[in-house]
Image (cartoon, rainbow, N blue to C red):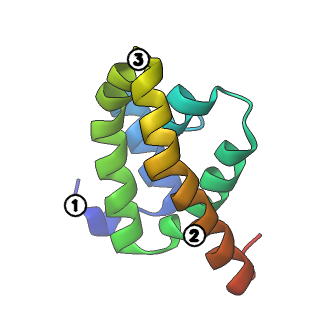
Amino acid sequence: MALEHFGTKSFLEFVSLHRNVQKSGCFIATAVYGEDASELELLRGFRDQYLMRSQLGRLFVLSYYLCSPYLAAVIAKSVMVREFVKNLFLKPMCVLIGRVMLRWKLP
């Protein structure tokens, strides 16, 4: 299926059917923070309100969904790796995303 055929709904259906994706899709953040973290809500909101609105954003999300389950499994096995990913990647990314969402007044 070509990327230009992906609307938000059909894209998520494609991912769910072909990759058995969890509803949230935040594999790496879930491996680092756990399932109920506020950071997950921020990341999901950014995905849904910003990334899924553009073709390039949907391509990024598809790429993430294809690669991240494996990476999340590796990350989940080590406390040191989880802390590394959290402090050097996820925390700064969440701060940046929070600022972008406030500036662009995304829900």
- Image location (x, y in percent) of residue 42: 68, 55
Question: Which residue lies at the image location 65% right of the left edge and 43% below the top edge?
Answer: 40
Provide residue 22's location: percent of width, then percent of height: 53, 29
Query: Residue 78 bears which disc, if any?
Result: 3
Q: Which mark is residue 2?
A: 1
Kind of residue sitting beneath label 1: Ala
- In this rendered view, identify the residue nearer to me: 6 or 24: 24
Indicate which label's residue lies in the foreground, 1 or 3: 3
Q: Residues within 10 Å of mark 2 (few under 14, many from 20)?
A: few
Where does label 2 land, which residue? 96
Amino acid at circle 2: Leu
SS for dot 1: loop
Is tag 1's residue or tag 3's residue first in the polypeptide sequence?
1
Instruction: Using the image as rendered, state which of residue 19 and residue 69 is in the foreground.
Output: 69
Instruction: Name which residue type carries label 3.
Output: Ser
How many residues crowd mark 1 within 10 Å: few (<14), some (14–19), many (20+)? Answer: few
Q: Secondary structure at mark 2?
A: helix
